[in-house]
Amino acid sequence: MKSEVIINKEKKQVIKICNSPKMFKKELYIYKKRLPFTPKLIDNDGKNTLMLDYIEGTPIVDLAQPNFVKITELIINLHSLESKNGKCICHYDNNPKNYLYADGKYYMLDFSEWIYDYPESDLIHFLLFWASTYNAIKFKHVFEKVISTYKAKRLINPLEWELILPEIILRFDSRRREFGKKQTHPDISTNREILKNII
Ligand SMILES: Nc1ncnc2c1ncn2[C@@H]1O[C@H](COP(=O)(O)OP(=O)(O)O)[C@@H](O)[C@H]1O
Ligand SMILES: [Mg+2]
């Protein structure tokens, strides 16, 4: 855990105590934008604590069939907020626990690590979670859905994709070790090969 999260289901509120002022500032920056796909910010203490609306939802990793078109639309919306020399706001920690599904809607949360980066890095990192979770047939389908949905609205640079893929895999693997996640699907190598097929 990167922070302390206290959930009060009765009051429908979540208190998040961030581990550092930097993380708090990052969270606040995004929540203050009051985006329609994030929990609403109720209050904050200006230091390290946020109070958010509680989303009574299911993490997408627990859904039988997450809607990857709708999930990719969240990423498109985040990436489209700002742009700086080809870089955009990237979620960075886009693990499937940071996406919830409730009442037909998808939500994104946990903006404590966002950075300005090339969009390709965020998409690769997001897809690596599913490459560790799904068999090759299912993963190929997810890969194609995510890429075609993204490309319908925003550019993907295939050269940038190819060049940064190895370093994003290193980052992913080192974070998995850091957070003690060992579980991987036997198709992971095939899935990572599929990930190279960007056009
Ligand atoms: N507003 C919210 N509504 C519902 N669940 C939440 C909310 N905020 C956090 N959670 C739950 O708490 C978990 C941890 O919160 P998160 O903001 O991701 O903190 P961390 O930095 O520790 O990962 C999330 O994965 C989610 O399951
Ligand atoms: Mg989180």
Image (tube, rainbow, N blue to C red):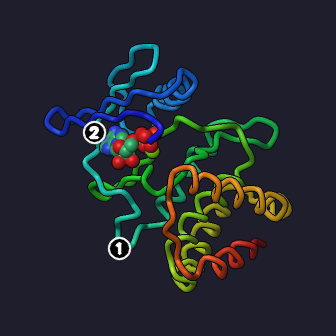
Expressed as whole percent of the image width and height from the top left, the position of residue 112 reads 53, 35
Mark 1 vs 2, N-terminal side = 2
Return the mark for residue 54: 2
**Contact (CB < 8 A) between labels 1 and 2?**
no
Expressed as whole percent of the image width and height from the top left, the position of residue 185 reads 52, 77
Tell me the crowding category of disc 2: few under 14, some 14 to 19, or many 20 or more residues within 10 angstroms, Cα based.
Answer: some
Residue drawn at point x = 33 percent, y = 26 percent: 51
Q: Can residue 136 be spotted in the picture?
A: yes
Per the image, label 1 sits on a secondary structure element best described as: loop
Most extreme residue toward the left, as rendered?
10
Residue drawn at point x = 55 percent, y = 73 percent: 142
Return the mark for residue 17: none
Residue drawn at point x = 71 percent, y = 78 percent: 193
Where does the N terminus fall, quadrant-wise? top left
Per the image, label 2 sits on a secondary structure element best described as: loop
**Amino acid bearing label 1:** Ala
Q: Can residue 109 be spotted in the picture?
A: no
Mark 2: is the Cβ under 8 angstroms from ligand 1?
yes
Most extreme residue toward the bottom, as rendered?
137
**Residue picked out by circle 1:** 64
Seen in the picture, residue 191 relative to 45 is either above or below; the reply is below
- The quadrant in which residue 164 appears is bottom right
Residue drawn at point x = 32 percent, y = 24 percent: 42
Expressed as whole percent of the image width and height from the top left, the position of residue 57 reads 28, 52
